[in-house]
Amino acid sequence: MSRRAARKMPKPSAIPHRLDTSFLRARPWIARQVGKAPGLALFWKAGPADSRLGMLWILTVCSDPLCPCRDVKVEARSVPDSLAYVKVIGDHTELASIPDPGAHEGPAARSEALAFLNIDIDTGAISPADQRTPDAELLAWARAEIDAELLAHLRAAWRAAKGMEPVEAKSPIFI
Ligand SMILES: [Zn+2]
């Protein structure tokens, strides 16, 4: 291999991959906001007293095209229905809330529960991503959301991070 070719190898620091900038406006009245913003997803369900409960996913995918891993990492957070939007810039996540007219101050939307999860993009199996114990309700909710549509979205995100075509492969890729 020439030195020129060697320099083209992906740098280890480029892995894993979290999209630099992503933005998603909250739509708490719908069930699922998937595929609207790279690396982000929002899920909503009925909460107490006509409120809506939200679950935000921030995806991280290994971007090494030669790595055989078949999973995505998800940082899941509970979010309130006062959430206005989510903005991710590098490692910084900004959650902005709609001001509550009954509150003395308008705090930024706070995320309360956290779960760091690993999702197998073929089987949909979900496991804790590391030693941190995931919030039990978020873990159960994440598992309940897994279906063909969501797995297709996760596979598309995985392919995009690996620098492959965004569509499902038409034929096997041989290198
Ligand atoms: Zn990998």
Image (tube, helix red, strand yellow):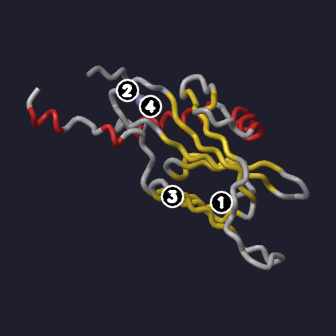
Q: Quadrant of the N terminus?
A: top left
Provide the residue designation for mark 4. Answer: 168
* Lower position in the chain sequence, tag 3 or tag 2: 2
Q: Position of residue 70 (x, y in %)?
A: 48, 26
**For the residues bearing labels 3 and 2, Cβ distance under 8 angstroms:** no
CA gap, disc 2 to disc 4?
18 Å
* Lower position in the chain sequence, tag 1 or tag 2: 1
Between tags 4 and 1, which lies in front? 1
Between tags 2 and 4, which lies in front? 2
Badge 3 amino acid: His
Badge 2 amino acid: Cys
Circle 1 crowding by C-alpha within 10 Å: few under 14, some 14–19, many from 20 = many
Provide the residue designation for mark 3. Answer: 92
Numbered disc 3: secondary structure: strand
Q: Residue at x 42, y 54 (%)?
A: 20
Please tell me in which quadrant of the rendered image residue 134 appears.
top right
Where 149 falls versus 109 (above or below)? above
User: Does mark 2 have its CB less than 8 Å from ligand 1?
Assistant: yes
* Lower position in the chain sequence, tag 4 or tag 1: 1
Label placed on residue 67:
2
Badge 1 amino acid: Ala
* Lower position in the chain sequence, tag 3 or tag 1: 1
* Lower position in the chain sequence, tag 4 or tag 3: 3
Provide the residue designation for mark 1. Answer: 26
Q: Residue at x 70, y 71 (%)?
A: 107
Numbered disc 2: secondary structure: loop
